[in-house]
Amino acid sequence: MENLDRSVFSINPNFFNIKEEDIDENFFFEIIENNYLTTYFQPIYNARDGSVYGFEALTRLKGYENWNNIGSLFKRAIELKRISQLDIRCREKAISLASMMGLKELEAYLFINICPHVLLDPFHRRGLTDEMVEKWDIKKEKVVLEITEESAIENYKLFQDTVTYYKKRGYKIAIDDFGSGYGGLKMLSLIEPDFIKIDRYFISQVDKVKIKYDLVDIIVSACERLNIKVIAEGLEYESEMRSVVDMGVDFLQGYLFSKPEGFLNTKRVNIL
């Protein structure tokens, strides 16, 4: 619990059981202002040869890296109108740590999650991401902005314009959790992403549940025609991996290969 006496631990000693409603303004002030945000990285592998294609940056709290309720932190930030502040700090931490760990010497991509609410926030200033990657010497073309499909998009025109802005700047775009949210096909047609990440719900037992297999197979076939690369996330078993590889999925991610870690794991894995 290093260095947490004055912050998260003092807010709620029973931190691992903290409820969403207990995350208040004071909580956000503590973790943001006192630099208690950190980043773990999970490799994304090439389905053809098992080489590392990129790393997804995942937010963690220092001293509580195994806390599995990060989603509640972001959901609560939206409710408290703190999402831009939280998201920007997470983005900055991911870019700076990846750079210091040697990403710029690798051919790998950096996948960063961005909440759609941030892109629509009037207080969100364009150019911040440019400033971050330029400061830390990471090429824009090697940064993939992951936009989760789970969040409802109320203003599609503004959202589309914002995504187009990032694409013109050189960034790649991915739709995360594809199939889990409100506007999958509509979002796909609006932003024409470079990647989609199929939600783990469909990947789990894809080798055993026929409807999941058929749906994933349809998505992979459609994306091949649209020149969109497909990432299967949440892989836990070799049988799941064999199924999606046989379908033609481009990239693989999940605990089967590697958990998120506090360093860039560049070790190649075996693809059966």
Image: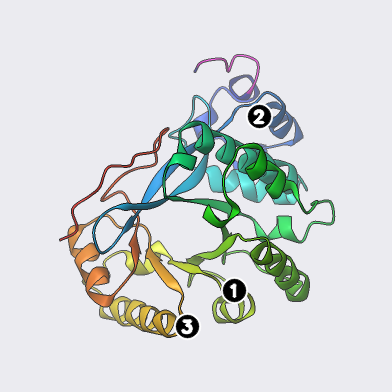
Query: Which of disc 3 and disc 1 is earlier in sequence?
Result: 1
- Magenta segment, prevailing SS (helix, strand or loop): loop
Query: Looking at the picture, which amino acid does disc 3 mark?
Result: Leu
Query: Looking at the picture, which amino acid does disc 2 mark?
Result: Ile
| Residue at image mark 2 | 31
| Residue at 47 percent of width and 83 percent of height | 226
Query: What span is in magenta?
Result: 2-7
Front residue of this view, candidates 104 and 152: 104
Residue 215 rendering spot, x and y as whole percentages: 36, 80
Eyeballing the image, is 149 above or below 75?
below
Q: Residues within 10 Å of mark 2 (few under 14, many from 20)?
A: some
Query: Which of disc 3 and disc 2 is earlier in sequence?
Result: 2
The quadrant holding residue 42 is top left
Indicate left or right for 75 with 141 as reference. right
Query: Looking at the picture, which amino acid does disc 1 mark?
Result: Tyr
Residue 99 rendering spot, x and y as whole percentages: 53, 36
Quarter of the picture holding the C terminus = bottom left
| Residue at image mark 1 | 182
